[in-house]
Amino acid sequence: DGGITQSPKYLFRKEGQNVTLSCEQNLNHDAMYWYRQDPGQGLRLIYYSQIVNDFQKGDIAEGYSVSREKKESFPLTVTSAQKNPTAFYLCASRIQGGPGNEQFFGPGTRLTVL
Amino acid sequence: AQSVTQPDIHITVSEGASLELRCNYSYGATPYLFWYVQSPGQGLQLLLKYFSGDTLVQGIKGFEAEFKRSQSSFNLRKPSVHWSDAAEYFCAVSGGGGNKLTFGTGTQLKVEL
């Protein structure tokens, strides 16, 4: 089955540690996205990538980093510079093309920093 | 800059009653609009989308939405709600570089049996 995989489902880290969240898709989509979700704030865009080896900052990129070495993979690193990293993180992908093409979402990773 | 407003944070309806969730958008050009649904602790699933043509759009699970340009609205409706519809609903507009989605803050739907 085609889809988006995020692992792990739950992640716990100590304050000051970097942590990497995995996102893999087998939909052959060109574009991939990372969102952060906090209660009452909807989803906010962290980073996005439209093609391999290229990515752009979203609205809340500070304290995060990404890479896009393969079309299928778009890992997100939450660095120690992120002041409030505890949140639910969602990865999405879409076929390249016009804005009418929808994004498909993974199941999410809940990160808790202790 | 594009933006989306969902004025209702929580809505409670009885099973079998009709439902309308409000969404207002701000976008300078032709809007591409989406409704997504999220069950607790899960990802988002697309319910329906609008980008041209008929202003009444049909989606999955019996949902529909009506695009009204004069009111900058894209309200989601369902004639008869089922208990399984309890979830959080997000309206979004697409555009700009990277065809980014801008989401509203969501409406939490509770269904009373």
Image: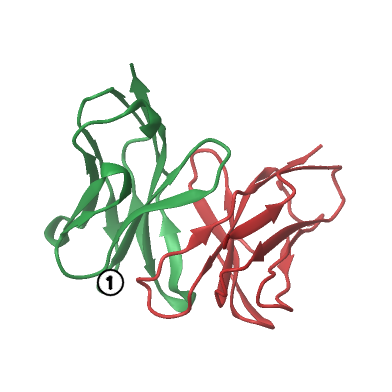
Q: Is residue B105 above or below residue A76?
A: above
Query: Which residue type carries mark 1?
Result: Gly
Q: Is residue A75 left or right of residue B53?
A: right
Label 1 environment density (alpha carbons within 10 Å; few <14, some 14–19, many ≥20): few
**Farthest front residue in view:** A1
- SS state under label 1: loop
Quick one: A8 or A111, which is closer to the camera?
A8
Q: Is residue A71 left or right of residue B13?
A: right
Q: Which residue is drawn at 50% across and 60% down?
A: A104
Q: Where is residue B36 in the image (x, y as percent from the top left)?
A: 40, 50
Q: Position of residue A114 (x, y in %)?
A: 82, 37
Q: Which residue is drawn at 28% across and 68% down?
A: B31
Q: In this view, does B39 lie above or below A29?
A: above
> Which residue is the site of mark 1?
B28
Q: Residue A101's image quarter? A: bottom left
Which hue is chain A drawn in? red
Q: Residue B22's image quarter? A: top left
The chain under label 1 reads: B
Q: Position of residue B64 (x, y in %)?
A: 22, 48
**Residue A62 visible in image:** no
Name the image colouring.
Answer: by chain
Which hue is chain B drawn in? green
Q: Residue at x 42, y 80 (%)?
A: A97
Q: In this view, does A90 lie to the left or right of B4?
A: right
Q: Is residue A32 left or right of residue B21?
A: right
Quick one: A13 or B55, which is closer to the camera?
B55
Q: Which residue is drawn at 73% across and 67% down?
A: A65
Quick one: B95 or B27, which is closer to the camera?
B95
**Residue B101 visible in image:** yes
- Which corner quadrant holds the N terminus of chain B? bottom left
